[in-house]
Image (cartoon, rainbow, N blue to C red):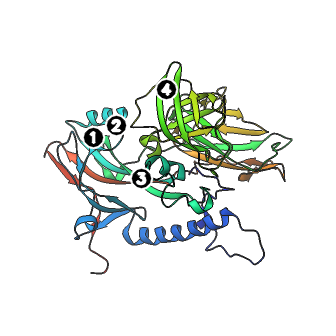
Amino acid sequence: MHGDFSRWLDDPVASYSRVLFQQGRVQLDQDFNEQIALGLALQRLMLRDLIGPHGAARGGSGPDAPGFAIGGPPDNPVAGAGRYWVEGWPVRNAAALALDRQPAWQPEEEAARRQFVGGAGLVWLDVWERSVSAAEQQALSAASPWAPGFLDPALGGAETTLRARLAWRLRVAPGQRDPQRFVPPRTTGRLAVATAEAGYAGQENRLYRVEIHTGGDAATARFTWSRDNGATALAVRAMAVEPGGLRIEALRPGGLAGSGPRAGDWVELIDAAAAEGVRRGPLAEVLQVAPDGAVLHLAPPQPDIALAGPVLLLRRWDQRQATLPVAGQGDGRHDLEDGLRLHFTTEDARGQPARFLAGDAWLIAARPAIGAILWPREAQASGGTIATACRPQWPWRGHAPLAVFDPRARRWREARRLFDPLGG
């Protein structure tokens, strides 16, 4: 989740039941976010125990109907309107939606759909949580520069909080006949972070973000990184193609996190697909910035892909090239900056080539007061400790199989779990 946080805890429900504030003490954003996360985690756990990993109550109509019933032709299945629970989260579909009518339809999704035609296959629901910032709301609410619900004119446009919301996508798995054995694509690689012997040499508290930008195995996957968890983002008012690149006119209300992009920085062009998390946006180098910061000139984006509607945001990243290879020099190791050292695993736990999914991210809190980073470590049999290789911390993802197409019977076989309402 992109945002200007001091720290982000991976799994707060594992050890604690609640946060207790004490009088006269400093209060951090981490404390409030952890308390909310604890309540949500317990609520989701209870709902999962009652409903199972996914399901919907029979009956109801309109938005209360059991949602995502699959019908239509096998080459373009249609999901019905309604609500469906996935891992304790209510996922809502406002109206019937065909597979290829999903917003920001991608070429790789079209390729999977074409493989689905004529044979057996599974339709499944991919669910994740994403953040929504004031800058994004500004870009979407052109009629109101105050981004209703995010910025208050009484504060001079200072940004306060973010919002989180669920995003979902219908996906197909060609050839998959058994929904119980279906395993969705996930990152199997891990990241360990340590420091040089001298420790963390930075002079500021940081929350570094390392994010997979291009998915694949360790040889093909690439990543970006940020010193501020990707919090520096500008709302885009207008974009135009000019000789040698792009001209961006940005909205710059006072108080947004970060100092804004400067010449030599790399920014990600966030369109509707990238904002929703369907894919990552192309990256471009900042060539020139007007003195007031409202106009930026960018080099041609990399890669040169079709954008899904207008560019909403520019998000600043801190690497000095478009992306970096996960493989590094072949061993997955990288010296980042100020003593930080990354080590991506090139194999998974079974010794198979590790896979990395675009959008997955790790967060690293660095503290100059102790010259170290806050990262888990584990004991070695020979003595001492070593940095733990961790799974991605973000985003949370859930999935639910919806239906399997039977090519012999030429019909859809239900894979949703429906139950009678608990209240009768």
Counting residues from the start of the chain, the first of labels 3 and 1 encountered is 1
Name the spot of residue 51 as percent of width and height, x first. Answer: 37, 69
Q: Is residue 54 above or below residue 124?
A: below
Q: Are marks 2 and 4 in contact (CB under 8 Å)?
A: no
- For the residues marked 3 and 1, what is the alpha-carbon distance in whole angstroms? 17 Å
Type of the residue with mark 3: Ala
Q: Are marks 4 and 3 in contact (CB under 8 Å)?
A: no
Front position in the image: 290 or 173 = 290
Type of the residue with mark 4: Pro
Name the spot of residue 18 as percent of width and height, x first. Answer: 62, 74
Query: Closer to the observer: label 3 or label 2?
Result: 3
Report the disc number at residue 303.
4
Counting residues from the start of the chain, the first of labels 2 and 1 encountered is 1
Neighbor class of circle 3 (other Cα within 10 Å; few <14, some 14-19, many 20+) is some
Outermost residue toward the right in this view: 198
Which residue is depicted at the point 82% across and 45% down?
203
Outermost residue toward the bottom in this view: 424
Counting residues from the start of the chain, the first of labels 3 and 2 encountered is 2
Outermost residue toward the left in this view: 409
- For the residues marked 4 and 3, what is the alpha-carbon distance in whole angstroms? 25 Å
Report the disc number at residue 109.
2
Q: Are marks 2 and 1 in contact (CB under 8 Å)?
A: yes
The answer to whether residue 357 of the structure is visible from this angle is no
Counting residues from the start of the chain, the first of labels 1 and 4 encountered is 1
- For the residues marked 3 and 2, what is the alpha-carbon distance in whole angstroms? 17 Å
Q: What SS does tag 4 mark?
A: loop
- For the residues marked 1 and 4, what is the alpha-carbon distance in whole angstroms? 23 Å
Which residue is depicted at the point 42% across and 41% down?
273
Residue identifier under label 1: 100
Counting residues from the start of the chain, the first of labels 2 and 4 encountered is 2
Type of the residue with mark 1: Asp
